[in-house]
Image: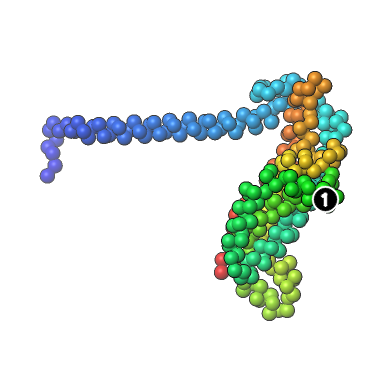
Amino acid sequence: MTAAAGAPTRPEPPFVTRVVTTSRVRHYVSRVLAVIGLALVVVLFGLPLAWLVTAPFDSTPSLAVQWPDWTLSNFSAIAENRYALGSFANSAIIGIGTCVVVIVLGALAAYALSRVRIPGRDGLLYALLLLSSIVTGTAAMVPTFQLVNSLGLIDTHLAVVLVVSGGTLPTVIFILKDFMDSIPKSYEESARLYGAKPWQILRDVVVPIARPGLAFVAVWTLVQVWGNFLVPYLLLRTTAKQPAAVLMYTFYTESGQADLRLLSAFSLVFSIPIIAMYFLVNRRYGFRFHGGIKN
């Protein structure tokens, strides 16, 4: 039975009205807090990026974000600095060398750990990852410096490559092992039936399938090396051998103030290779933290 048309409606009980009002207030408050939180995140990340984009083109840059007085003279200051361009070459040498060492050794180790049953294998991987993330790095720089000094590798790019590779390899092996686990063993067995040698299976079957993982590791390793300050700062004594991340630390005027004209332009040029490589690899392979082939 329905209520007759025009009949007076019964008012809601007071406690129902309070519950509805409280629910609406909570909804609006949560929306307002979410917007405020998002705005804070945008400001915290956006302001440094806005300074990085505008300051290099400002004739009188400051630490504040402002509309630039357009000029390109800041970039000519890079060419006039005797060490600036060479520092990018040093960064490229250290970055490419580290990528080669990490990818080759990391892929071989990850493949072996994926195919060979070793007692305590997973525990070993987690222990290496933990030690490389916490114990090594800054805490291990004194013994690392003494080891490099005893080997006679102080002030060489090879020392930086080996030290950074040693600290990066455990994480790389941990990531690549997941890619190797996703490669069906039937592919390798089929290749073996056709007479393929082990190195041919690794080159023609395993590596092509694991290319997205190798590309991700290459970008991740290059980012770690490109912005690394502590290791090259301690191991390289000659200014001409220092990478860009360390040389940036020396950009001061004669009065001891930071040279913002040179520093801003150098920072923008310093960021371009990593950004370009990120978009190139993302477009070509995409970034994934695990393999995508199933049995």
Residue at 17%, 31% in the rendered image: 11
Based on the displayed image, in which of its 4 quarters is residue 78 positioned?
A: top right
Q: Position of residue 150 (x, y in %)?
A: 83, 50
Residue on which disc 1 sits: 150
Quadrant in the rendering for residue 183: bottom right
Report the colour scheme.
Answer: rainbow
Q: Residue at x 72, y 57 (%)?
A: 103
Q: Of 32 and 12, which appears nearest the observer?
A: 32
Q: Which kind of residue does numbered mark 1 sit on?
A: Ser
Q: Toward the viewer: 10 or 256? A: 256
Kindly state the secondary structure of the residue where label 1 is placed. Answer: helix
Q: Quadrant of the N terminus?
A: top left
Q: Position of residue 274 (x, y in %)?
A: 71, 43
Is 281 drawn above or below residue 240 in the view shown?
below
Asked whether the viewer can see residue 69, the reply is yes
Count the marks: 1
Q: Give the quarter of the figure containing the C terminus.
A: bottom right
Q: For the point 85% across and 50% down, which residue is it?
A: 152
* Image quadrant assignment for residue 238: top right
Tell me: 123 left or right of 237. Answer: left
Residue 282 image position (x, y, % from top left): 65, 49
The answer, for residue 213, to whether it is visible in the render is no
Q: Residue 290: where, in percent of width, then height?
A: 59, 57
